[in-house]
Image (cartoon, rainbow, N blue to C red):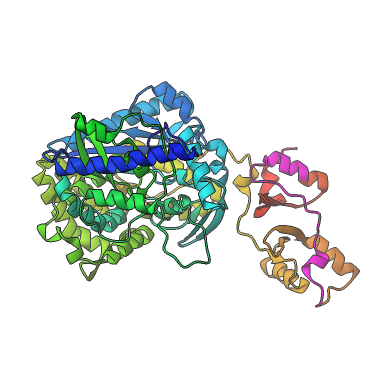
Amino acid sequence: MGEHNVKGQVDKKSRARFIEHLLDDIEALEIMLEEGLIEDDIIRIGAEQEFCLVNNHWRPAKNSEEILKRINDTHFTTELARYNLEINLDPLELKKDCFSKVEKQLNNLLTKAKITSREFDTKVLLTGILPTIRKRHLELAYMTPNPRYQMLNEILRAQRGTDFELHIRGVDELNIHHKNVLFEACNTSFQMHLQIPPQDFVSSYNWAQAISAPVLGVSANSPLLFGRELWSETRIALFRQSMDIRSASNALKDRRARVTFSNQWASGSVLEIFKNDIALHKVVLSRDISKNSLSEIKKGIIPKLQALNLHNGTVYRWNRPCYGISEGKPHVRIENRYIPSGPTILDEVSNFAFWAGLMIGRPSKFDNMPANMDFRDAKGNFIKAARMGKDSILRWMNKSISVQDLILHELLPIAYTGLKKANIDNNDIERLLKVIENRTKGNTPNEWAVKNYRFLKKSMKKDNALRALTKTIYQNQQNRFPGHDWPTIKSIPEILDDTSLVGHIMSTNLFTVDEYDLASLATSIMKWKKIHHVPVESESGKLSGLLTWNHVKKIQDQEKINDQRIVSDIMVKKVVTVQPKTNIKQAIDLMKMHEIGCLPVVQEQDLVGIITIKDVIAFDHD
């Protein structure tokens, strides 16, 4: 998540000073580009590995700070949520066995994290979205207590002015609002960096945009969120909406999201991309900066461009331009941010080799992407790939082609050429690109997850199915087979009993009625669906009452329900409710105390589920 020593709401003078530094950084970068100070005779790669921490019940852990302290390694850093950590790998020159070195360092560092995590009864998991995350894991208690995260949350919340909203439609649909940015913490990625010669930056950047869709399509592994089947790579929609500070307005105007694929091909130089992002996106974080970048250049010192880097870190391009200093020399690079974490280290390194090979092997005919492809095709392709993964049909150079055919017949040959051009060891080229080929021909990780989740749900409640799926992902990762070789689940995995909260067992597949509906309609629904409890909602969607079959029968025995009576005339108005985080034992006691057979489950006055005596009877040991 970038620089931690930051400020949020500051006085006007401090903000003005920061913006002055930001403008000076742009001018300093322009000078460095004009004078040829940006490194252009070497290509380096780097990566950031985000990963999840889960407890023995396969749910999000809450102890990243303790684990990080015990690891005591500067390669590791915190993430937004207390169930995530990040590893920053050492940069390497793109040559020979660099990808084997990336793989080895990843294995060593993750092994270190695993060993340390075991001391805290915690496990390390690589996955784009942790299947067992529930809404309660997005409360502020799960946010890492770091000033940057807290300020970012406060500022984005203030600028938006309303709750954050999530609307994603796939096989299932998710509509939910939330009071903080922790939706973003559901996303876990493997971010890849590639140094680019400054004179080739725009051509490389546009090519990176063009190939994003097929690379994403064959790498997708995040189809589930809150137990719903959404996009093949749900992270794309989730991250965009979780960081969106735009709110609805009556004005018809184009406003840019901070998470963006962009709206047009890049032009000019890398400087123009940075300038556009300053022009289009408000400064949301600042920090005290003691050294002026222009003054440092005059002294012959390479500046860090701290203001520019901080602002750039709050603009979330899927392909992000970056400035940095390596071994005392300034460079520019492209950060690929759309690839999910997992399913294995081998899969991630194969994705890295595929992408880097494509970038280096770019045919000269694609040096000028605007002459070859409509930008809206590239952007549309990216959304299609996020939605449908490998099954997407893309518009590629004005023709329609499947992701599978595009990769197998056009892109893999380019990647082979690029890696050979970079003098990568032949064994690594064959080994890593073979993973991409086999995955393209076989199963992608998102397809594996959907197929097996559906199998588990046939004989398990949703919460247990998600835990069983998470356990299987973990076990497969220990075997280190690439995702396309993972076996189909044939039998139900054993999982520790952890259904201690109402939210673990409640039903979310609800039949509800409106308090102004005809009573005869409500009773008919209860008969048709053979259900004994129906929550009643007000016009604003809040829980206002409950229909129970016993109560309805009592009224029917006393007097016939005529066609004119409405639900509010016959419903129970004093409803006993619980929350998702209510202990099941407590819920059982409430049912006994009030002699009732069900409890509506509410969260912040919204109806989110229902539990009945049948759901909890297994837990009643009295």
Is the residue 377 above or below the residue 240 in the image? Answer: below
Depth order, front residue of 133/195:
195
Depth order, front residue of 621/182:
182
Query: x%, y% of residue 512?
Result: 68, 63
Q: Which residue is drawn at the image coordinates 43% and 34% (left, top)?
A: 6
Query: x%, y% of residue 211?
Result: 24, 56
Whether the magenta-drawn stretch holds residue 573 is answered as yes
**What is the count of numbered marks?**
0
Q: Which residues are magenta?
A: 564-590
Q: Which residue is drawn at the image coordinates 39% and 56% (left, top)?
A: 232
Depth order, front residue of 472/96:
96
Is the residue 108 above or below the residue 395 in the image? Answer: above
Q: Please state if 514 lies on the left or on the right of 345 as rendered.
A: right
Image quadrant of residue 126?
A: top left
Whether the magenta-drawn stretch holds residue 565 is answered as yes
Residue farthest along the right direction in this orientation: 558
In the picture, the quarter occupied by the N terminus is: top left
Query: x%, y% of residue 50?
Result: 37, 38
Q: Which residue is drawn at the image coordinates 39% and 38% (left, top)?
A: 18
Q: Please state if 619 lies on the left or on the right of 198 as rendered.
A: right
